[in-house]
Image (cartoon, rainbow, N blue to C red):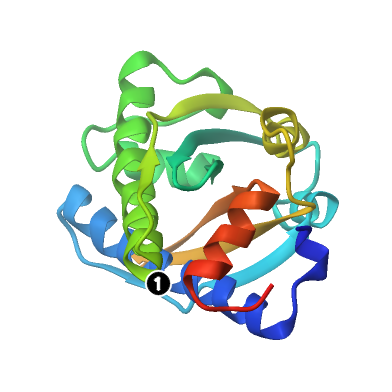
Amino acid sequence: MDHKDLNELQLDVMREIGNIGAGNACTALSVLLGTAIDMSVPRVQLLGYESTAEQLGGEDKTVIGLKIEINGDLDGMMVHVVEKRFAERIINTFYAKEIENIASLDEMDSSVLNEMANITSGAYANSIATLTGLFVNIGTPNQIPGKVLDIMKLPLTAFVKPGEHVLLVDEEFTIDDEHISSNMILALESDSLAKLFARLGVQV
């Protein structure tokens, strides 16, 4: 099935997955950083690839994509889209460093971001598994620095039957009185999306 065919009830289910996943990811991130983190209600949207790129700041914006493959009962991927300030704030929790260029992090910097992605993507995967009863396994993060356009090509080139839209979760965290944005993209193959709805009792 294509995402463009979703009705309002199906969209509500996808938004609920995004909301619960974001809340659990916030809790996991707070434990990782050892500090209290507040999160405003996340903005959850189902968008086409072009619209998603616009929401992320435009195709030419430089970011890091942390790609985590989803397998098991569902096939797809999650992609953390990390901007410079968010990366700097996470890294500086563990050691002081000013990030000059997000596209050229060293091995230790990358390791910190990968650990963050492991923990928060695990929170999203557990949320989906709890809601559906499906086995949701995730791979290790694959860090891809580049332009937003390159990041948005990842699901299109990885899937045999990519959905036409992705779920974009826009997260707004407050860490030590600083507001920092982060984004999570959930992209599923069309057949996996249909399986997801079937397990939730939502008619396709």
- The image quadrant that residue 202 belongs to is bottom right
Residue 82: tell me if it is visible.
no
Q: Residue furthest bottom?
A: 9
Foreground pick, 91 / 78: 78
Q: Is residue 129 left or right of residue 2?
A: left
- The image quadrant that residue 139 belongs to is top left
* Screen quadrant of the C terminus: bottom right
Residue 63 place in picture, x, y as percent: 61, 36
Residue 15 place in picture, x, y as percent: 56, 74
* Screen quadrant of the N terminus: bottom right
Residue 18 place in picture, x, y as percent: 50, 67
For mark 1, does the 10 Å Cα neighbourhood hold few (<14), some (14 to 19), or many (20 or more) residues? Answer: some
State the SS at label 1.
Answer: helix
The image shows residue 6, relative to residue 71, as above or below, that is: below
Residue at figure coordinates x 79%, y 47% from the top left: 58
The image shows residue 57, relative to residue 59, as above or below, that is: below
Residue at figure coordinates x 25%, y 56% from the top left: 28
The residue labelled by disc 1 is: 20
Residue at figure coordinates x 59%, y 51% from the top left: 192
Foreground pick, 172 / 164: 164
The image shows residue 97, relative to residue 163, as above or below, that is: above
Three-letter code, disc 1 = Ile
Residue 22: tell me if it is visible.
yes
Residue at figure coordinates x 74%, y 30% from the top left: 150
Counting the numbered discs, the total is 1
Residue 134 place in picture, x, y as percent: 38, 57
Q: Is residue 149 left or right of residue 71?
A: right
Foreground pick, 24 / 97: 24
